Each structure stands twice: as structure tokens, then as C-alpha cells.
Image: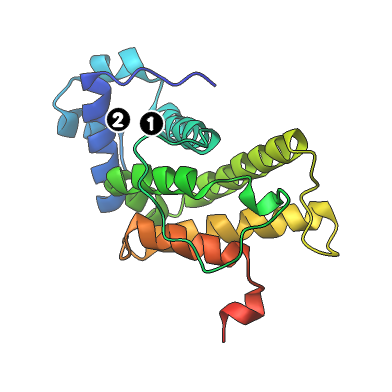
Amino acid sequence: MVRKRNTGTEAKIKVAFTQLLKEKGFDAMTVSDIARIAGINRGTFYMHYMDKFDLRQQLLDNALFDLRRILTDSEASGAAAVPQPGTAARQHPSVLDVISPQSTLAALRYIRNDAAFFDAVTRSGHDMTMYEETKKILRRLLEEKAEAMHIRPALGAIPHEYGTEVVVSSVTSIIWLWVRRGFTESPEEITKYIEINKRMTPLSLLR
């Protein structure tokens, strides 16, 4: 997937789409609505997108492209140190180390910096596409890096297919709950929760 160049006009269209998604919902909005709020004519809109469905897909694709790029960069630039749970350093590589806390933090900052869009998508009822695609990104990344590290994505006695699902589902669910709650916590706090979650069983987290 090649990320679409974000021009000034496309940025205005995205802002208009985000506003209408929150105010009217996707089904009720029209291209005329989008063009009016963006301050452009319909012809200009159609120079960039085929219709509102194409617009939505491209916006989702762009966000997912960026998230994959950020999560793939294990040395996420500009990521500050993340508070680590008090666990002893492991002697051998683990599947839990495949997605670094620095990359997680960078991805969370990216989401918060575009909070209006992610909030609108989440509240519109169309967020499951992004949720499932984010899981796919994490699963693919986990499997690729685990293979490069010569480890199997398993959790104890759980087969690797199930171990992978546990990891990617829990991380994605924490992120999406954070979005639904209105970004109440900081990206640093959520990163810390994800790191703790990686190393504890679900029941132990409820104590």
C-alpha cells in the first residue's frame, strides 16, 4: 500500500469528513456536505476521490499505513523513555519483546495527535474495520519479527496460533478502549499498561 500524498485540499476534506462523521454519521453525509464544509466545489472533491466510500477507505488506509510504519520502526525516533514494570531482564529473546515499548508509544502518540479522526471513526460504528486491520498489522509484525529472532509466538503451553491471538487482541483492545474513553490517560500510561499486560495473566490483572 502506498500512502496517498496529503495535500492542503485533502487535509480540508479530511477535517470536513471527520466533522460530518461525528455530527451526521457516514450514511447520512453527502459529497455536497463534505465539499461545502471543506470550502471546495464538488468537482474538486472528485479530482481526489471517487465518492465518499473511496474517501473513507483512503483515510483508513493512510492511518493503517502510518501505524504499520511506526510499529515496524523499533527505534521510533523521538520516543521518550517508557516506565517499565519491575521485572527482571530476560536472558533469551521473547515474543513479548517483538513490539518495543518505544514503537508502541510512538503509535499511541500518532493516534492522539489525530484524536478527532480516530474518535469520530470509533464513535461512528465503523471502527471495527480499523480494529481488525490493526490486529492484522500486529499479527504480521509479530510473526515476521519472531521468525527473524528464531522464536515461536507461543505463551507457555499455548500453541503459537493462540498465543499470537492473545497478544495482538489484548494490545489492540487496550488501545481501542483508550480511544473510546476519550484519551483520558497519556500515551506513556497506556504504553506502561500494555507492557504490564504482556507479562501477566488476565486473572492476575484483576486482583
How packed mark 2 is, by other alpha carbons closer than 10 Å (few <14, some 14-19, many 20 or more), is some
Q: Quadrant of residue 179?
A: bottom left
Kind of residue sitting beneath label 1: Lys
Q: How far apart are marks 1 and 2 (CA)?
A: 6 Å
Give coordinates of residue 104: x percent, y percent: 47, 48
- Element under label 2? helix
Q: Is residue 203 left or right of residue 12?
A: right
Q: Residue 31 carries which label?
A: 2
Q: What's under tag 2, amino acid-wise? A: Val
Q: Whole-percent x and y of residue 54?
A: 44, 27
Which coloring applies here? rainbow
**Residue at image point 61% right, 44% down:** 138
x, y percentage for residue 153? 76, 50
Task: Specify whether 161 is left or right of 190.
Answer: right
Label drawn at residue 52: 1
Q: What residue is rendered at 55% in x and 44% in y?
A: 134
Q: Earlier in the sequence, mark 1 or mark 2?
A: 2
Q: Do the residues labelled 1 and 2 touch (CB within 8 Å)?
A: yes
* Residue 39 higher or lower than 86, as above or below: above
Q: Quadrant of the N terminus?
A: top right
As drawn, 64 above or below 180: above
Foreground: 76 or 182? 76
Question: Can residue 28 be seen?
Answer: no
